[in-house]
Amino acid sequence: MTRFQFAMLALWLSFTVLAFSYFINDKLKDFDADNKLANITALSLAPQIRSFLSSDSAENSIIHLSKKNCGCQATSEVHIQEINNIALVNHFNVINVVLEEHDTLPSTPSIAIINNAGEVIYYGPYGQGIACSQTAGYAQTVLKNYLKGYMSNIIIKEAKGCYCKL
């Protein structure tokens, strides 16, 4: 390989890496870009999340939040199916809510998990990264831990992935 060919190869590889980085970073959005969740706790979020339930009774519930025509919804379908399988076996209510805007909730696709006391044990995205597949899923981990007897009140405020702003 001549010096010229080596230089061209190095230039081509550099350009390819830069282009890939540019397009990847363009796809990654902050889950809470407007800091809607900045001063929100699980306790203060609970009444808003419970408003999506069909009754006032506190029951174990999974609330899937989506936005119409959100291209990111498809990337979370694997997470949604896994969570639904776990939820149904363990007698959770599964509720699907379509939102166009919300004063507190920042983005979709997202999920809220409510325990039988009506507390938010998780609110946030299904995962993060390209196609939200970088993690096994925050929500699955919290749900599995809750079923093992571990209690948490987690609100994910900082994540980057494919999200549609509300």
Image (cartoon, rainbow, N blue to C red):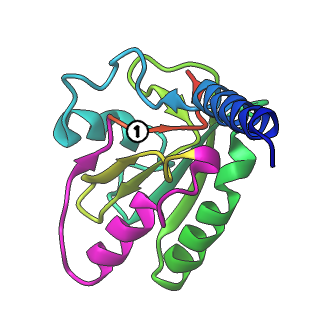
Q: Residue at x 65, y 36 (%)?
A: 17
> From the viewer's perspective, is residue 19 above or below residue 90?
above
Residue 79 location in percent, x, y?
59, 63
Residue at left offset 38%, top offset 43% = 50
Report the residue at 75% width, 49% height from top: 74
Q: As drawn, is 100 to the left or to the right of 43?
A: right
Q: Which residues are magenta?
A: 130-157
* Quarter containing the C terminus: top right
Give the residue at mark 1. Answer: 159
Q: How many marks?
A: 1
* Percent coordinates x, y for residue 89 in the rendering: 53, 85
Q: Residue at x 28, y 75 (%)?
A: 145
Q: Nearer the viewer, residue 69 or 53?
A: 69
Front one among 126 and 153: 126
Residue found farthest to the front = 2
Left or right of 76 on screen, residue 47: left
Image-based side of 158 in relation to 92, left or right: left
Check disc 1: other Cα within 10 Å, few if <14, some if 14-19, many if 20+.
some
Check the image and report above or below for 96 versus 98.
below
Label 1: state its secondary structure: loop
Residue 72 sits in quarter: top right
Residue 108 on the magenta span: no
Q: Is residue 137 magenta?
A: yes
Q: Nearer the viewer, residue 66 or 55?
A: 66
Q: Position of residue 147 (x, y in %)?
A: 31, 80
Q: Is residue 117 left or right of residue 113?
A: left
- Amino acid at circle 1: Ala
